[in-house]
Amino acid sequence: MKELLATVLSWVAFMSALMILNVPIYLIVCSKCDMFESKSLYYRISNGYFDFLATLPGDGLWLFFGLAPTIWLLLFLWTGSARIAPWERRRD
């Protein structure tokens, strides 16, 4: 159970870090009129992530930039490995 929770948290942190890199693309591309319609996969994934952040308690900006490093720190304290790349398993 501990390994499953650590894996899920590491994937959440990894996806949060990817979304930080995604924001400049989202602002430039999706702000253009009629560039992407609201039914596109890119639009749905980006807005789905922002909706996910809205469900978490706390300030949105702190969550956006601080969620991934906080999870990595907690994973390091809990398991001894930050698991920044979630597909790599810790080898004991």
Image: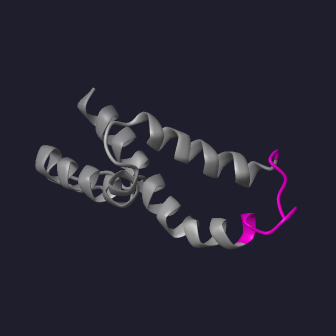
Q: Quadrant of residue 29?
A: bottom right
Using the rendered view, name the quadrant where residue 4 is placed: top left
From the viewer's perspective, tell me whether residue 50 is left or right of residue 42. left
Q: How is the image coloured?
A: one colour
Q: Position of residue 54 (x, y in %)?
A: 46, 40
In magenta stretch: residue 2: no
Residue at the image position 39 percent from the left and 39 percent from the top: 8
Q: Quick one: quadrant of the N terminus?
A: top left
- Camera sees residue 26: yes
Query: Which range is magenta?
Result: 29-39
Front-most of residues 53 and 31? 31
Q: Residue furthest top?
A: 1
Q: On the rendered structure, is 61 left or right of 50?
A: left
Residue 92 appearing in the image = no
Q: Main secondary structure of the magenta part?
A: loop
Q: Measuring 72% from the left and 52% from the top, which residue is drawn there? A: 43
Q: Position of residue 3 (x, y in %)?
A: 28, 36
Residue 58 percent across, percent down from the top left? 31, 42
25 to 65, vertically: above or below = below
Q: Residue at image x 37%, y 56%? A: 88
* Place of residue 59 in the rendered image (x, y in percent of width and height, measured from the top left): 34, 48
| Quadrant hosting residue 65 | bottom left
* Residue plotted at (48% across, 64% down): 20
Give the number of callouts.
Answer: 0
Residue 38 belongs to the span the image colors magenta: yes
- The relative height of residue 42 versus residue 5 in the rendered view (above or below) is below
